[in-house]
Image (spheres, grey):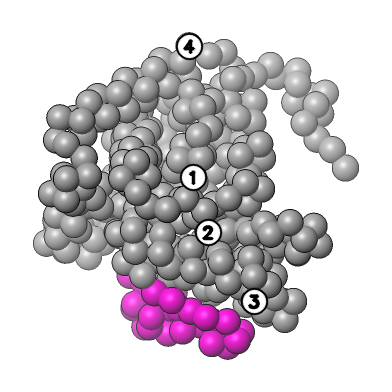
């Protein structure tokens, strides 16, 4: 596992910026290219530090499963951003040939084993990957990413129970982004999840539970690294609650092609009328916060940080151009069941 020297810290900042800029292009697509993205799209802006801090702990052969809010993981893992954008646009050159879309990205070559539009679906799948890793006996670890809402699903409880019983090498990373669609996570009603912090749920399954500031990539790295080392040592799983703040609305608005659209405002504003809360979250944005920290500590010069930002913007502009020019998949492929197997 790589230590957090200056080069690694700059890598973490660069990946956080790449995720943010990629998703900014996705968001802008709804205004600049109406109708290009079909179906639902969910952004993870505000969770970049949590994603990168967690992925920085990975070693060769490790794997992960993510939620439908999934763009950032393959970006940070090094998957071609052109292929990711093309998949979101439903184009032939996409990761899944244009058939999966925004919520179903996958790149097994980099250990990114997939996502699902179903809340909590990836948790039992990641647990199965953990069992396979245990059987291989090669010291591999699986990271299972999911939101706070997934902790209400039976799959969450069943998976953590089994993983603890069998001491599977899985780190469960719950990215608590404060909202279940338009319901605040701490509301005491049928939509809320009991327990605060939510990491206390780990006690029911005899595993460690840790809550960490998901806006601090170094803090996330240290917590997930300790959990991964415990898993590699055969001591079983850990539940990590990474507290983040989702900076965009839950998802986009669906409309017919050609209808001018923009990504909607956050639920703090539209549902609760609390613009002050949202503006406070913007002031705590983890991307500029981490940049300022590295510059202040002398890890990264301001000029170099600006150059990195320019390079990242150019990369994401190229991804959009590629995806827009890429053709759609052939309809005949679906008729031939080319991508269906049993």
**Membership of 124 in magenta stretch:** no
Location of residue 228 in the rendering, given as x and y in whole percent from the top left corner: 55, 64
The answer to whether residue 241 is left or right of residue 294 is right
| Cα–Cα gap, marks 3 and 2 | 20 Å
Residue count near mark 2 (Cα–Cα under 10 Å), binned few <14, some 14–19, many ≥20: many
Q: Which residue carries the number 3 mark?
A: 235
Tell me which residue sits at (37%, 52%) in the image. Answer: 4
Upstream in sequence: badge 4 or badge 2: 2
Location of residue 188 in the rendering, given as x and y in whole percent from the top left corner: 36, 83
Please say if the residues under marks 1 and 2 sit with CB atoms less than 8 Å apart: yes
Secondary structure beneath label 3: loop
Label drawn at residue 325 = 4
Judging depth in this view, the residue of 112 and 178 nearest the camera is 112
Q: Mark 4 or mark 2: which is in front?
A: 2
Location of residue 255 in the rendering, given as x and y in whole percent from the top left corner: 41, 35
The segment highlighted magenta reads 184-211
For residue 192, which quarter of the picture? bottom left
The answer to whether residue 22 is left or right of residue 145 is left
**Membership of 190 in magenta stretch:** yes
Residue 135, relative to residue 83: is it above or below?
below
Tell me which residue sits at (14%, 54%) in the image. Answer: 283
Q: Which residue carries the number 1 mark?
A: 73
Secondary structure beneath label 2: strand
Tell me which residue sits at (50%, 34%) in the image. Answer: 78
Secondary structure beneath label 4: helix
Residue 341, relative to residue 285: is it above or below?
above
Residue count near mark 4 (Cα–Cα under 10 Å), binned few <14, some 14–19, many ≥20: few
| Cα–Cα gap, marks 1 and 2 | 10 Å
Please say if the residues under marks 3 and 1 sit with CB atoms less than 8 Å apart: no
Secondary structure beneath label 1: helix
């Amino acid at each position: 596992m790589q230590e957090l020297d200056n080069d690694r810290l700059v890598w973490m900042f660069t990946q956080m910026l790449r995720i943010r800029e990629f998703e900014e292009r996705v968001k802008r697509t709804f205004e600049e290219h109406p109708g290009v993205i079909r179906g639902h799209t969910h952004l993870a802006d505000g969770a970049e530090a949590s994603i990168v801090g967690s992925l920085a702990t990975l070693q060769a052969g490790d794997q992960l499963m993510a939620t439908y809010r999934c763009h950032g993981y393959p970006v940070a893992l090094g998957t071609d951003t052109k292929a990711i954008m093309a998949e979101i646009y439903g184009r032939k050159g996409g990761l899944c040939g244009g058939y999966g879309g925004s919520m179903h990205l996958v790149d097994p070559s980099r250990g990114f084993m997939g996502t699902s539009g179903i809340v909590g679906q990836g948790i039992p799948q990641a647990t199965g990957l953990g069992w396979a890793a245990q059987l291989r006996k090669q010291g591999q670890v699986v990271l299972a990413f999911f939101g706070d809402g997934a902790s209400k699903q039976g799959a969450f409880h069943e998976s953590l129970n089994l993983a603890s019983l069998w001491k599977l090498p899985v780190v469960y990373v719950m990215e608590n982004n404060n909202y279940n669609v338009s319901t605040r996570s701490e509301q005491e009603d049928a939509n809320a999840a009991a327990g605060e912090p939510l990491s206390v749920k780990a006690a029911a399954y005899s595993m460690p539970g840790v809550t960490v500031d998901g806006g601090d990539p170094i803090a996330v790295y240290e917590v997930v690294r300790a959990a991964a080392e415990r898993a590699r040592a055969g001591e079983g799983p850990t539940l990590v609650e990474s507290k983040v703040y989702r900076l965009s609305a839950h998802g986009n608005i669906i409309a017919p092609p050609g209808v001018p659209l923009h990504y909607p405002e956050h639920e703090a504003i539209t549902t609760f009328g609390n613009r002050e809360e949202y503006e406070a979250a913007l002031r705590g944005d983890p991307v500029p916060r981490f940049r300022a920290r590295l510059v202040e500590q002398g890890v990264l010069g301001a000029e170099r940080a600006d150059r990195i930002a320019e390079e990242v913007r150019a990369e994401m502009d190229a991804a959009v151009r590629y995806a827009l020019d890429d053709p759609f998949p052939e309809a005949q492929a679906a008729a031939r069941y080319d991508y269906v197997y049993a």
